[in-house]
Amino acid sequence: MVSRIDAINITARDHESLGAFWQQLLALQEDPDNPNNPGDPVTVFLTEPVAVNFVFQPADEGKEFTPRIHFDLNPVGSTRDEEVERLKGLGATVVADRRRENGSGYVTMSDVDGNEFCVQRSPEEVAAAGH
């Protein structure tokens, strides 16, 4: 037996603003059959089925441990740099720029509620670079 992810739940200071940010970022559609009770302030979004990689990382030695979920994103139909600019226009901010001279690397960004995520190169960019 196995389990599958049914939903990723994100608690936010301003759930409507954060939901709108991620809706635009991932092209999510609102669920017309929202399973929440009438009057619930929760918004449910749907996305196309996708393959998701799970990365389990050790906590940094000597730092206070804080559980977190962090998304690594690959642009669809654009380059990493174009996606970074688009997301800045949605209200995201750059936390760390880890792009390298050879074109590899990523950009760590923060959403409108301070949650961090990384924007990597698109699969097309990786293929064109040969790595």
Image (tube, helix red, strand yellow):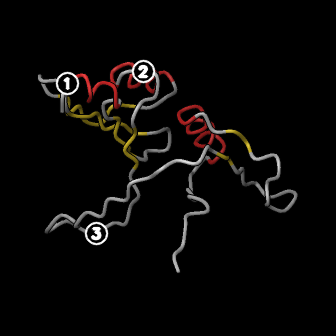
* Callout 2 amino acid: Ser
Image quadrant in which the C terminus is located: top left
Residue wearing tag 1: 129
Q: Are marks 1 and 3 in contact (CB under 8 Å)?
A: no
Q: Is residue 48 left or right of residue 73?
A: right
- Horizontal side, residue 117 vs residue 3: left or right: left
Which of these two is toward me, 5 or 97? 5
Q: Is residue 77 above or below residue 43?
A: above
Say which label, 1 or 3, has the lower sequence index.
3
At horizontal 53% and vertical 33% (from top left) the residue drawn is: 25
Q: CA distance from mark 3 to mark 2?
A: 35 Å
Please state which of residues 79 and 118 is positioned toward the viewer in this rendering: 79
Q: Nearer the viewer, mark 3 or mark 2?
A: 2
- What label does residue 4 carry, if any? none
Q: Identify the element where label 3 is drawn.
A: loop
Give coordinates of residue 105: x percent, y percent.
21, 34
Circles 3 and 2, Cβ within 8 Å, touching? The answer is: no
Give percent across and percent down for residue 21: 57, 35
N-terminal label among 3 and 2: 3
Mark identifier at residue 65:
3
Compare marks 2 and 1 and give the one earlier in the sequence. 2
The residue at 62%/44% (across/down) is: 47
Q: Specify few, some or many for label 2: CA neighbours under 10 Å numbering under 14, 14-19, or 20 or more.
A: some
User: How far apart, in angstroms, are the residues tagged by discs 2 and 1?
Assistant: 15 Å
Percent x, y of residue 65: 28, 69
Secondary structure, mark 2, is: loop
Whether tag 2 and tag 1 are in contact, CB under 8 A, the answer is no
| Residue receiving disc 2 | 78
* Kind of residue sitting beneath label 3: Phe
